[in-house]
Image: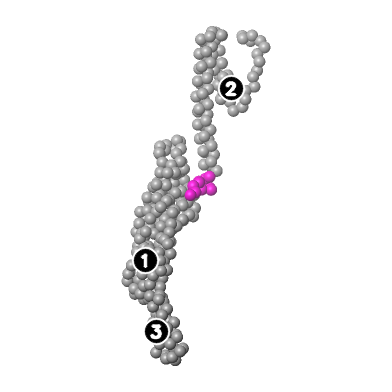
Amino acid sequence: MLFAAMILFFGGLYMVISQSNTMFLIAIIIALFILPGFTLVNPNNSRVLLLFGKYVGTIKKNGFYWVNPFFTKKKISLRASNFDSERLKVNDKIGNPVMISTILVWRVTDTYKAAFDVDNYENFVRVQTDAAVRKLASMYPYDNFADEGLDEDITLRSSVNEVSEDLEKEIQERLAMAGIEVLEARIGYLAYAQEIANAMLKRQQATAIVAARHKIVEGAVSMVEMALDELSKKELVDLDEERKSAMVSNLMVVLCSDKDAAPIVNAGTLHH
């Protein structure tokens, strides 16, 4: 068709100029009518074809094509697209406000659905992704705090893989009607909202301190028990219950203290 259009255009133009015959203008008009039918399809692109509002088909194979000049050609990309959502303020399962965003990798697989089942498929991806993130955040707590009576295996902060899988599944269900495949979905940003961030930071620090103290106390008790057992086995000193209690108290203070102990040397006897 490209060769025919060139022959008609240049041949008609030559005949009009050389023969001064306006009848050959018809050939030029036909060539100009043929030209709009040419279309170029690049790799990972497509052309959706319509004839007076009726769907005709889709060209997905890359190359140079000629179609009916009356066809309306709509371009839809088949390439993978990356979408980084805005940071949304939502409430987690226990009502704490958190800031969350998601990173989505998607592509069009069904051009008919993308072109005709939704108004604007790119905007549809954004809106439905935000809706899925809001729903997901309300299903899980941000973190698992023992003082709230929570016994959750999955949390937004610690269960990254599980949350990402659920998010990907939720978004895929929403975007299926638009002919869109979700390649990857994961949490891009997650933090407490500004109004409670300081309080939650102190709470996390307190939880960590309590857990550390618990381990320190366990270790101190074991060391005191070992010390008493060794003294008893080797019979280095005979301690009554009162002195054992004093020794345990002193050792616990030394082992559990935040600061280094300042030893006091007793220059007297054991009884004074």
* For residue 250, above or below residue 194: above
| Left or right relative to 168: residue 231 | right
Q: Amino acid at mark 1?
A: Ile
Q: Which mark is residue 59?
A: 1
From where the camera sits, is residue 101 visible? yes
Mark 3 vs mark 1: in front: 3
Local secondary structure at mark 1: strand
* Residue visible at 40% across and 81% down in the picture: 8
Q: Nearer the viewer, residue 40 or 227?
A: 40
* Residue visible at 48% across and 49% down in the picture: 188
Local secondary structure at mark 3: helix
Quarter assignment of residue 180? bottom left
Q: Quadrant of the C terminus?
A: top right
230 drawn magenta: no
Q: Which residue is mark 3?
A: 27
Residue 225 is situated, as x and y percent measured from the top left of the image, at: 50, 17
Task: Please tell me how crowded label 2 is: few (under 14), some (14-19), or many (20+) other residues with Cα within 10 Å.
Answer: some
Q: Amino acid at mark 2?
A: Val
Q: Which residue is mark 2?
A: 254
**How many discs appear?**
3
From where the camera sits, is residue 76 visible? no
- Which is more N-terminal, label 3 or label 2? 3
194 drawn magenta: yes
Q: CA distance from mark 2 to mark 3?
A: 105 Å
